[in-house]
Image (cartoon, grey):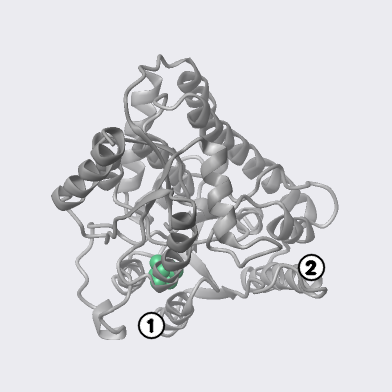
Amino acid sequence: MIIDQTVEQCRDVLDLMPGEAIARAREKHPGIKGFGVFPVYAPVEIIHAAGLMPVGMFGAGNKVEISHADSRFQSFICSIAKSTLELFLRGDMEDFVGAVFSSICDVARNLSSVVHRNAPNIYVEYLHLPQSRISDATVAYTRMEFERFRKNLSHHLGRPIGNDAIAHSIGLYNKVRRLTRELYQHRKERPGSIAASELYAVVQAGTRIMPEEFIVLLEPFVEAVKQREVHERDCVNVVIEGAFCEQMPLGLIDVIEAAGCQVKDDDLAVGWRLFEDDVSTEGNGTAALADAYLSRTVYTSVRHDGDQPRTEGLVRRMKDAGSEAVIFAPAKFCEPALLDYVMFRQRLEKDNIAHLKVEFEEKMWTFESARTEMETFAESMLFD
Ligand code: SF4
């Protein structure tokens, strides 16, 4: 009962336009304004500590027609960049003070400049995340960059963002991430206790709800999932890889499981659950977040390689999850994910690990060809 109700509630949140999500938050936090966070990662704790509501900008799905954004971009780019810009051009972000983009790829970089130019009332910040995680200068550089983000935001708002406030926000997001980790871990141990689309709906809704309220929603949900009866079924255990910024439609995630696969791990909305354990609430908050970003994150292909190539990270993630195949899910025209796919594929084929690539785009509304491919893939593995 709790599970169905919570998932339903979260799906409703995902249907909200950004301004509606802010209006809902104002019922508990009068007058609060939003601050957009373009994937994959930004230190949302600093935004929350500034008295704003961090909101994940995952595009607009099939909720808006692209009428203006096409004229600002070339046609062959991922849909999330266009639909995000469209939201700004349509005036859907009026309840937002600003937005932050980061160095995930050239499209995201350009998007921040195009938003800056076309939405003059929005404060646009660009976070230069480190390209190297192992250089001697990396720690100092990343701390400086996170501190710059805090100072600029504080200056823009005309109020301080103190260490105590940041520590409080880190504590809240630590709790959200801890509960989310519990869900992910439980799914690995008891696959079938939560469907991939249920888990994803809840995690993504958390990017549109204040952490204070999200914790209240998550706590009983996690307990209910742990109590849920699980029925074993014959299926192929898989991990989903390659989600980058644009996220798979819920319908496509459903198709993966309905076609005979069981998702045991995924990298959906990974930037919002990036840390493998709690971020320190002691001392300087921006330094704690920068240090956690550099050394306490889960494996993800969206970060530059550290001491181990990311191909090994994927193999390790598969083994940890007890899965036997990988579903690559790059968004159409997402060059970083498509380039990674070539490298990952070579690595998996070296060990004869099965994989399938399913490209998607935001406005995808029929999943029949993906369903056929998935069913063929699952059957070839189950009846081999
Ligand atoms: S989805 Fe891919 S191409 Fe689009 S902004 Fe993200 S990383 Fe860049």
Q: Going 71% across and 71% down the picture, which residue do you hit?
A: 151
- What is the secondary structure assignment of the residue under circle 1? helix
Q: Is residue 119 above or below residue 294?
A: below
> Which corner quadrant of the image does residue 141 belong to?
bottom right
Mark toward the viewer: 1 or 2: 2
Q: Going 52% across and 20% down the picture, which residue do you hit?
A: 223
Instruction: From the viewer's side, name the closer residue of 247 and 89.
Output: 247
In the image: residue 131, left or right of residue 204? right
Looking at the rendered structure, which numbered label has been put on residue 56?
Answer: none
Mark yes or no: residue 213 visible.
Answer: no
User: Which comes before the other along the chain, label 1 or label 2?
Assistant: 1
Q: Position of residue 305 (x, y in %)?
A: 63, 65
Looking at the rendered structure, which numbered label has been put on residue 118?
Answer: 1
Indicate the amino acid at tag 1: Asn
Indicate the amino acid at tag 2: Val
Q: Going 50% across and 59% down the picture, which residue do you hit?
A: 347
For the C terminus, which image quadrant? top left
- Neighbor class of circle 1 (other Cα within 10 Å; few <14, some 14-19, many 20+) is some
Q: Going 60% across and 41% down the picture, which residue do you hit?
A: 177
Quadrant for ligand 1?
bottom left
Instruction: From the viewer's side, name the closer residue of 50 and 186.
Output: 186
- What is the secondary structure assignment of the residue under circle 2? helix
In the image: residue 329, left or right of residue 316? left
Which residue was labeled with disc 2? 139
